[in-house]
Amino acid sequence: MTGGWSDAAGWQARLNEVQLRHAGLQLRNQGAIPLVLGPAPATSPAAAPRPWRWQVGKAVLDVLLDGQSLLQIQHQGSEGQAGQWQSKGRIDPLVVTPQRITDLQAWLGRGGAQAGGVHTALSEQARRSQLRLRLDWALAFAKTLSGDVRLERLDGDLTVPGDVPIQLHLQQASLALAIRPAAALTSRAALDLQVVTKDMGRLRVRAETPIHASEQGGLSVHPQDVKQVHVEAQSEDLSWVNLFLGGAAEIGGTVHADIQGRSRADGTWSFTGPLRGEDLRILMVDQGVRLLDGTLQARFDGMRVVLERLHFPAVRRVTPKEWRTATWVTENPDAQNGGLDLSGQWDVLTQQGDVTIGFRRYPILQRADRYAMISGDLRVQASLPRIGLSGKIVADAGWFDLEMLSNIPALDGDVVVLKPGEKTPAPAATPLDVRADLSVDLGPRFYLTGFGLDSGLTGALDLSLRAGKLTALGALHTRGGAIDAYGQHLQLRRGTVTFQGDIANPVLDIQALRTDVAVQAGVQVVGTARHPRIDLVSRPEVSETEKLTWLLLGHGPDEAGGDMSLLFSVGSSFLSGGEPFYKRFGLDELSMRSGELGSTGSILPVESVVSGLDTGASPIEQRFVMASKTLSERLKVSLEQALAQTGTVARLSYRLMRGLQAEMTVGTVSGLALVYRWLSVD
């Protein structure tokens, strides 16, 4: 610094170098800065004390962050004396980039996490985007504050980073602050923000407030002062809202708002004005929920947001694959022209409100593997953190494919998901106290398919949620239908699931029978879901071994250990995911049996002459594997191979009439036979 003192001008100097550093932030000058401190020039020839004044001349100041240029201040001049001051200057250009915002947040201690994710071309575009602004100020104070501050866009654009970066496509952006004297020690500040984009629409916010000055030169805004705000918004594309949803949903559509607000003496606000929306959409793709073509009518009333009507017409996007559901929703006139309507109110100040939701023939769920059209009414009452849900829902049509459950990915219980930059999981937010009392009626057209099951489902449940625990009262019943298990087609004769509290542990009463054989055999499941009991049943009642053979093989047990063949068949079914593996090779039956190789089941022996001195083989040594193939309705061919001995028999069977068939065997045992079988049922 160089300079000196004179009686006429006071102290005058030139500040040659300025270097300020703090925590990575640096301020430095370009060229010398004129400084003046001394008595103000005389305003009259009379000898009177002159007040002291100060002046800072033109200066160019660079602001750096971590050695990188942040902005440049072009100071045009500032001066002041007792009770008054004025300043003028600009920042041109003020460059805003996502990286600079991140760096500044890190310096302020509000960020600093390194963003992860995949660096796609679009995210690279976000990192390269920049917005060039210009800031001008001209302010003065002489018992009241006055002047102007203006921030406006020069050129460029900004892409907001995120999972799906959004380019703003700015066409105009400006922020003007005009301050004018209004009364003694009082000024009135008027702010005007205008933003115009190519696709998202336009926004204008105007606000006014008094600014008070004290005798000592201080400035303040009093809470009891009347402040005003006027918001005019025309958003042609609500996709920018998705930035705040974290990927949980996708919002779209057009919204127009004209809201005016005025503060009260107690510091609260009152708002009025309409809010209108068109072509609204809410998408939750993973859940199959797509609310389309919505219209919104709402208004502000004091501190309440009044939802007069939010309507989504029923739009059928997907035709269910299940033929009964598809027929009803496409051909029945009563299934057309449905809709979803919401109305209610929310008090922003008290965080209380209620919403009524009405469904009429509305396809709330539309996916290739599930479908639901519902009617009914729900009411949501909230007084945060408590939320209450009540009402009744009836399924007009529904279908659920159980096989989709096997395709739902899930993380192991020991997996912890961290957001980019996190080292430990974020603390859980304050939990909401959600309470629900819902009645759900499945109606007459709800179906379950998949995993061999094809059945209707009827019944109703009363659901209750308290303290995070869901309970249910009611019963669900199967309506006809069948289930394929172990390669067999079983008819559902009875199916009831009764809920008496814990929704995860209902009481089961299910019976499925194979009905294409003389003895109808099947399984019965009773008990609770956690402790079920599975029994074999038959009509008429037969032994357990016979139940198994009739269920799995379609005929009664042979005379020499049919239980082994049953175990073989069941095992093969498990190994092939529910379908016997031998069917993949074109066979109709593959089983293990015990008895005489080549036997027809007659009481007469297979051989009537002595062929050796052996007194007979044990049951284990008499086991053999039998494979068969039905060539036509009457003709069947089979092959029997001994396991413990060297014997092979090929058999050709031809059904002459009901119960009577001719058989020819060749190999270890050769011969011809006429076999007549019958079953006596008391």
Image (cartoon, helix red, strand yellow):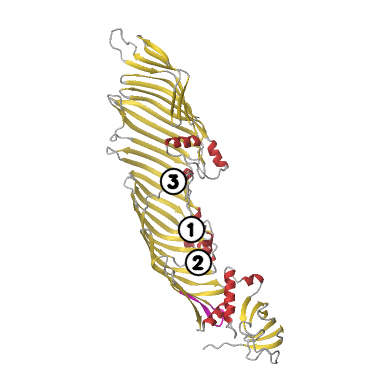
Part of the protein shown in magenta: 514-525
Q: For the residues marked 1 and 2, what is the alpha-carbon distance in whole angstroms?
A: 15 Å
Pick whichever of labels 3 and 2 is earlier in the sequence. Answer: 3
Asked whether residue 319 appears in the rendered view, the answer is: no
1 vs 2, front mark: 2
Residue 519 highlighted magenta (yes or no): yes
Instruction: Tell me the kind of residue under disc 2.
Output: Leu
User: Residue tagged by mark 3?
Assistant: 277
Provide the secondary structure element on which disc 1 rests.
strand
Vertical placement of 22 versus 654: above or below?
above
Quadrant placement of the N terminus: top left
Q: For the residues marked 3 and 2, what is the alpha-carbon distance in whole angstroms?
A: 38 Å
Left or right of 425, for residue 262:
left
Q: Do the residues labelled 1 and 2 touch (CB within 8 Å)?
A: no
3 vs 2, front mark: 2
Residue that appears at 44% across and 65% down? 442
User: Residue tagged by mark 2?
Assistant: 448
Vertical placement of 404 versus 241: above or below?
below
Mark seen at residue 365 = 1
Instruction: Tell me the kind of residue under disc 3.
Output: Gly
Q: Do the residues labelled 3 and 1 touch (CB within 8 Å)?
A: no
Instruction: Tell me the kind of residue under disc 1.
Output: Leu
Pick whichever of labels 3 and 1 is earlier in the sequence. Answer: 3
Pick whichever of labels 1 and 2 is earlier in the sequence. Answer: 1
Provide the secondary structure element on which disc 3 rests.
strand
Q: For the residues marked 3 and 1, what is the alpha-carbon distance in whole angstroms?
A: 23 Å
Residue that appears at 53% across and 81% down? 547
Instruction: State which quadrant residue 261 falls in.
Output: top left
